[in-house]
Image (cartoon, grey):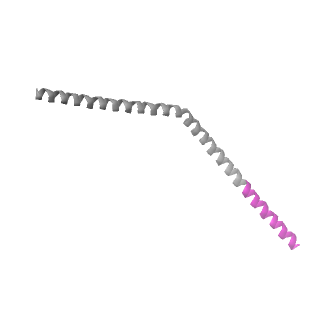
Amino acid sequence: MEKCKHEAMRLLDNEQKQKTSMELLEQYIQFQQGSIVNENKKAPYEEMAMTKKGKYLQEMKVYKKKKKDEEDDDHMKEGEQSMELKNQEAL
């Protein structure tokens, strides 16, 4: 009788452990599915962000080049003006 009771307790304990394991596994699977759904929702926006970032970087490159060219032109004009002043002063 004692042996039968002990065996029943062991089976019950194993069954409870198995239920707990299955519950944890189900929770994990639900969590993973939720994160996958969230990633799928984000994907189009991330693609748009990457496209816009590329466009922004390209526009900034053009802007910086244009700005540098303008500054170079300004420096050349200043140099020419100072040369003209020196020439006029020399006369």
Residue 83: quadrant of the picture: bottom right
Residue 35 among those drawn in magenta? no
Residue occupying the point 55% across, 32% down: 44
Residue 20: quadrant of the picture: top left
Q: Give the percent coordinates (x, y) of residue 39.
A: 49, 34
Residue 7: quadrant of the picture: top left
Total numbered labels:
0
Q: Give the percent coordinates (x, y) of residue 67.
A: 71, 53
Residue 83 among those drawn in magenta? yes
Q: In this view, does 71 lie to the left or right of 28?
A: right
In this orientation, which residue lies closer to the viewer: 11 or 80?
11
Q: Give the range drawn in magenta.
A: 70-91
Residue occupying the point 49% across, 33% down: 38
Q: Is the magenta stretch mostly helix, strand or loop?
A: helix
User: Relative to residue 82, is residue 13 depicted above or below?
Assistant: above
Q: Give the percent coordinates (x, y) of residue 4.
A: 13, 26
Q: In this view, does 54 lie to the left or right of 70?
A: left
Q: Give the percent coordinates (x, y) of residue 3.
A: 11, 28
In this orientation, which residue lies closer to the viewer: 82 or 50?
50
User: Relative to residue 51, is residue 74 depicted above or below?
Assistant: below
Q: In what quadrant of the picture does the C terminus appear?
A: bottom right
Q: In what quadrant of the picture does the N terminus appear?
A: top left
Q: In this view, does 30 lie to the left or right of 50?
A: left
Residue occupying the point 80% across, 63% down: 80
In this orientation, which residue lies closer to the viewer: 15 or 25?
15
Residue occupying the point 58% across, 36% down: 48
In this orientation, which residue lies closer to the viewer: 59 or 9?
9
Judged from this view, the residue extending furthest toward the bottom is 90
Judged from this view, the residue extending furthest toward the right is 91
